[in-house]
Image (cartoon, helix red, strand yellow):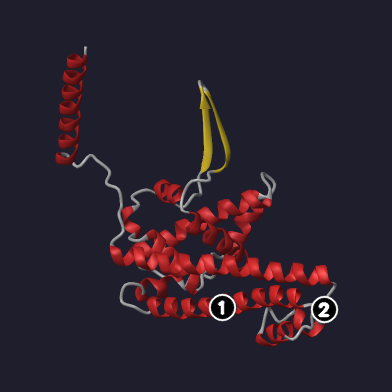
Amino acid sequence: MPGSNKELIRKTDKVDSRKIAKGLKNNDLNCIFIPDEQLESDRQLLRSRVKIVRDTTSVKNRIKAFLKIKGINIPGEYKSSKWSKKLIAWLQNIEHNNISSKIAFGSYIDELIFLLQKQMQLDKAIETLSKSENYSGNMLLLRTVPAIGLLSAMTLLTELGNINRFQKQDHLYSYCGLTPDCHSSGDTERVGKVSRRGNIFIKTVLIECAWVAVRKDPALLLYYKQQLPKMDRNKAIIKVARKLLNRIRYVLKNKAEYQVGIVE
């Protein structure tokens, strides 16, 4: 029996090898995209900023919780300053009843200052990268899309890589996590919520941009309103994100500036 099993495995391996060789010869196999070292490094630069922003938000929430526990209210003059230097200076000068409270709160402030400095460094590095030969041309094209800024454009360019590697729209939707989960059983097929699979960095950026796009592009706003009677607003904005992604694909593939839709 052991000998028979080994012989069967050898025959199976030969068959699989022939199928792979034939597929390579006929160009029938789909290759997996592997980013080069430079593109992967550029991705990590953008992703590190996402993580820094996430950590900064956590620290800000801890500071707010600390102030709430202590019954300390931020003065009205600082509430709209979005964590300016003046607000941070005010936080540093808060008087504490004991040394433990002072040390604990001070650690939060020190961490916040450190993270804000790192975010500033990353922002400058990303801006410099956007002006490089690899990105400057496509950056100018994407910035014509009314919803896309520098950071969102660089996220799209680094995460997507060469847009021409997506031969079909559905492949692009799937990669970006904008396809619904489908559950099949016999002759029944149910379409569920948007899949959790796909590139979370692109998906997040596209949804954020879609909310901006419906305010700036009349055609996308009309499309969004047409979806609302059929579904809730969160599902409707996913459909807008898909349409926006399709337009981004067109801009990059055809090297053409974005045209804002006109509703007559």
Crowding near pointer 1: few (<14 within 10 Å), some, many (20+)?
few
**Quadrant of residue 80 within the rendered picture:** bottom right
Residue 84 is tagged as none
Q: Mark 1 or mark 2, which is nearer to you?
A: 2
Q: Any mark on residue 97, and which? A: 2
Q: Nearer the viewer, residue 112 or 79?
A: 112
Q: Is residue 99 above or below residue 36?
A: below
Residue 137 versus residue 157 in the image, above or below = below
Amino acid type, residue under disc 2 in the picture: Asn
| Residue depicted at 71% across the width and 75% down the height | 105
Tell me: residue 98, above or below residue 228: below
Could you tell me if residue 258 is visible in this image?
no
For the residue labelled by badge 1, is the local secondary structure a helix, a strand or a loop? helix
Residue 6 found in image quarter: top left
Q: Which residue is mark 1?
A: 114
Identify whether 240 is placed above or below 12.
below
Left or right? Give the position of 117 relative to 5: right
